[in-house]
Amino acid sequence: MIYRENGQFKTSYGADQQIFPIAQDRWAVLAIIAFAFIGVPLLADEYMFRAILIPFLILSLAALGVNLLVGYCGQITLGAGAFMAIGAYAAYNFLIRIDGMPLLGALILGGLTSAAMGILFGIPSLRVRGLYLAVATLAAQFFWDWAFLRIKWFTNDSSSGSVSVSNLDFFGWTIDAPAEKYLFCLGMLVVFGLLAKNMTRASIGRQWMAIRDMDVAAEVIGIRPMWAKLSAFAVSSFFVGVAGAMWGFVHLGSWEPAAFSVDRSFQLLFMVIIGGLGSIVGSFFGAAFIVILPIFLNQMLPALGGLFGVSISTAAVSHAELIIFGVLIVFFLIVEPHGLARLWATSKEKLRLWPFPH
């Protein structure tokens, strides 16, 4: 049996509380990370880096932040795109206005600025929930879209309204080639992914889940709803803000407020729903699905139309993409609310018994 656990004994509490208590999981994850750092840069081409891998890594980080808030704490948000924009523009201003500011420092400060704004716009969560909270966070999206478009200070008085960043340097390492950008994004994602996983297993993560399941009962057992909800908004916004800064600095290089529109907020929410609410691995599944599906449709639908002698335009492909997204979201909400992560967990449970049917 491939996935057997016989003979794997736990002799300490720490061993039983490992992130991956099963040896096969540990070795598989280590092998995937090693291949991602060593194998992928040797095998992938420039198109793969720019169109798939780098967007996937950055959007996975943003999806992690959204999942901490929506999946683990149960606070609905429709303003993730705004907090990505806050992180990007804050990091840009820290970088150009402070002499000698390192790239990592600008990214972290951009994330902290986004976290502060997340706390501010998370205050309504203390009084409202559900659809009303979603509308309150949507207000942040429209407000910051207007602010970055109209207030010239954020763009360093740029006449075109766009900003650009070049010559990225990470402690002497010049991040210029697509493979170098990929490795930088991968390193950041590994660090933040490990941080997110440990936070969900710690006391703060248990508080978030208690608030999500029943906030009144959580308050009765001594959990402070204000601290739990605002800390979830802060941590989530920090992750999303760092992802936004990386999206602008590493992936785009030059951007304008439209790069972080409300469509980006919905895209991140779709990632969490399809990947799996309350699951770290679900954030990666959702990001991979959202990044790969449009590329797959752009290649498949015209070829399918040519097979039947029908010409399919680019507009039709984009409309089909929206339709498929909507259908998949409805499907997962009805059939499998826990998304692709639950399907993955079910397959692992079946592997424990394979090849026996019982």
Image (spheres, rainbow, N blue to C red):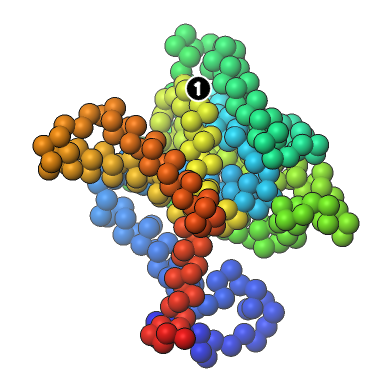
Please name the amino acid that badge 1 sits on: Pro
Picture quadrant where residue 135 is located = top right
Is residue 269 at all visible to an observer of this figure?
yes
Is residue 276 at all visible to an observer of this figure?
no
Identity of the residue drawn at 42% across and 62% down: 33
Residue placed most toward the observer, 200 or 106? 200
Is residue 119 depicted above or below 189 in this figure? above
Q: Quadrant of the N terminus?
A: bottom left
On the image, the x and y values in percent for residue 48 come to 29, 45
Classify residue 245 as left or right of residue 132: left
Is residue 287 depicted above or below 16 in this figure? above
On the image, the x and y values in percent for residue 54 come to 39, 43
Residue placed most toward the observer, 94 or 113? 113
**Residue lying furthest bottom:** 7
Picture quadrant where residue 99 is located = top right
The total number of labels drawn is: 1
Identity of the residue drawn at 51% across and 40% down: 268
Residue placed most toward the observer, 201 or 142? 142
Is residue 318 depicted above or below 230 in this figure? above
Classify residue 325 as left or right of residue 15: left
Is residue 126 depicted above or below 332 in this figure? above
Please rate how many residues cluster around mark 1, counting C-alpha atoms within 10 Å: few if below 14, some from 14 to 19, many from 20.
many
The local secondary structure at tag 1 comes to helix
- Residue bearing the label numbered 1: 257
On the image, the x and y values in percent for residue 237 come to 63, 39
**Residue lying furthest top:** 159
Identity of the residue drawn at 59% across and 68% down: 19
Identity of the residue drawn at 66% across and 57% down: 199
On the image, the x and y values in percent for residue 84 come to 55, 33
